[in-house]
Amino acid sequence: MAVPTPSAGKARWNKIFRWFALHPYWTLTLAVLAALGPFLTKPFNLDDPLFIWTARQIHVHPADPYGFNVEWGWTAFPMWKVTENPPLAGYYLAAAAEIFGWSEIALHCALLLPALAVVWGTYRLARRFCRQPLLATLAALFTPVFLVSSLTVTCDVLLLAFWVWAVVFWVEGTNQNDSRKLFIASLLIALAELSKYYGACLLPLLAAHSLMNRRRVGQWAQFLLIPLAVLCSYQYAMQAAYGSSLLYRAMDYASFSQNLFAFSKLHTGLVALAFTGGCLAAVAFFMPLLWRPRELAILAGGAGLILFALALDGEMWKRSGPVMTLPHVAIETQFVFWAAIGLSILALALIDLVSRRDALAGLLGLWVLGTVFFAAFCNWTVNARSLLPMTPAVGILIVRRLEQRGTSADAGIWSRGVIVSLAASASLAGGVTRSDFLLATAVRRCAEQICSRYRHRPGMLWFQGHWGFEYYMQSFGASALDLKDSSLKPGDGLVLPSNNTNPLPPNPEKTELMETLTIPGPHWLTTWNTATGAGFYASVWGPLPFAFGPVPPEGASVYLLKQ
């Protein structure tokens, strides 16, 4: 039997990569399925229940998406007061559930389509920006923020799908003077707005790109009136249905939360940098290929400035939540590292803009810088989902920088450094995704075990807390406690989750602790635990998008009301 020679092995790998390059859409489809497929049974968690409850309401009353009450903050509120997003994602979930059912795997499979639309659209867009669109798309795919967000049932990936295709058709339409493509882009902008209010940011972004491209206001401007009219019509419809402007309520909530938490601009800016670097962590593994040694030294100096800023912001860790399982130095080290990567991402956008000075570079630069600015200073908190929209732009910027430096390989055979960087990116993104999966699984197991033990005892079983814990406790037969209309009686049970929001400890004189249940979740990496400083979904929970180190188990305490 002949032993393959090194040249034969190299030729085989070249053939494989050539096939990938010649069949990009199949390659990207397989990559998405490989990355997300193992986690399609992920339990619902965090804000997922809000979208599922909206979808169930739409399933019964399609014209009244928010006409129900929800326990979300110690008492029941009308859903239109709780939600901060338009209802299009709820309509999509309701339609998918009508066909596939309401199970976790059914809804996650339905949301594979928006995820695939994002990567297909990123590839098509990247073809106009760089010579290696497949690499740019894979660099965007293998980021923690995209993979984790794709396994929620919220509106964020749906927004990004409409966003990236709106940019595709707008760029092609303005370059080709094609009114049909501009009209399609305007409809996609409207759908992005109805998925999430941030979609309206496409209006100034694409207007700025067209002005840089055409140097004047042209026929393209009239197409931006369509999504503007749709947004105004939506506002009128919600005002008529619920007596309130839901867009203005979302803006008021952001302002209220910023005043409530009262973080300084320095604090939110630093946290936004750390979230940018961690959520788009692929840049970290391409650093040796992106920057020369002198440029890396400058970035290291930037990390030193971040350390100095941390020293000035003495409230950073104290006000971001207790960091109990790790010494502060471990959290600070991770924070400074990801903030330095965040600086690198901003530098990629700025250097690309300064060096090229064209409309395409302007589009990428405004796309990235605008998203970071919004996440830091306009949103109610810094979170990963606010940074998700810039994922395609960052993937494209990585490849444009590689091509500018001459360090990327040709379209047929990728260099070893590129392959290693991409593989490392995929490994980290997969690890973060798995940790988020284990977290959600532990929350569901906790709810299931508590209900199986206590639901059939005499008396009612009540609980506090929200997110996935609330969803599964209700699914298994427990009732949410309304503190404004408490029906607690002697003999009832009360459950308080540990890693959750809004729990109020019961009166120790009137209750007896029956059990404290602990369920192992992720071990050395987590996206959501204030004890480790991880606050992927909201930085008020922790200053890191994800944290390495020992992770406390999920759990809950069960109390019995005394006679």
Image (spheres, helix red, strand yellow):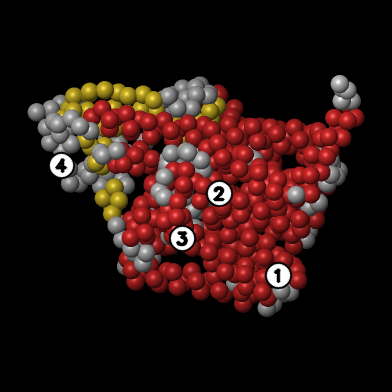
User: Does 427 appear above or below 74?
Assistant: above
Say which of 365 and 91 sits in front.
Answer: 91
Q: Position of residue 298 (x, y in %)?
A: 74, 36
Q: For this view, does 242 lie left or right of residue 512?
A: right
Say which of 448 and 431 sits in front.
Answer: 448
What amino acid is found at the position of numbered circle 3 in the picture? Leu
- Is residue 28 visible to the viewer in this orientation of the structure? yes
Sequence-wise, the earlier of marks 4 and 1 is 1
Q: Position of residue 105 (x, y in %)?
A: 47, 43
Q: Nearer the viewer, mark 4 or mark 2?
A: 2
Q: Residues within 10 Å of mark 3 (few under 14, many from 20)?
A: many
Sequence-wise, the earlier of marks 4 and 2 is 2
Residue at 72% across, 70% down: 174
Q: Which residue is mark 2?
A: 112
Q: Residues within 10 Å of mark 2 (few under 14, many from 20)?
A: many
Distance of mark 4 from mark 1, alpha carbons?
A: 61 Å
Residue at 29% across, 27% down: 557
- Is residue 340 visible to the viewer in this orientation of the structure? no
Sequence-wise, the earlier of marks 1 and 2 is 2
Distance of mark 4 from mark 2, alpha carbons?
A: 42 Å
Q: For this view, does 415 lie left or right of residue 260?
A: right
Distance of mark 2 from mark 3, alpha carbons?
A: 16 Å
| Rendered image quadrant of residue 428 | top right
Answer yes or no: do the residues labelled 3 and 1 have beta carbons within 8 Å? no
Callout 4 secondary element: loop
Q: Which residue is mark 1?
A: 173
Q: Which residue is mark 3?
A: 88
Answer yes or no: do the residues labelled 3 and 4 have beta carbons within 8 Å? no
What amino acid is found at the position of numbered circle 4 in the picture? Ser
What amino acid is found at the position of numbered circle 1 in the picture? Gly
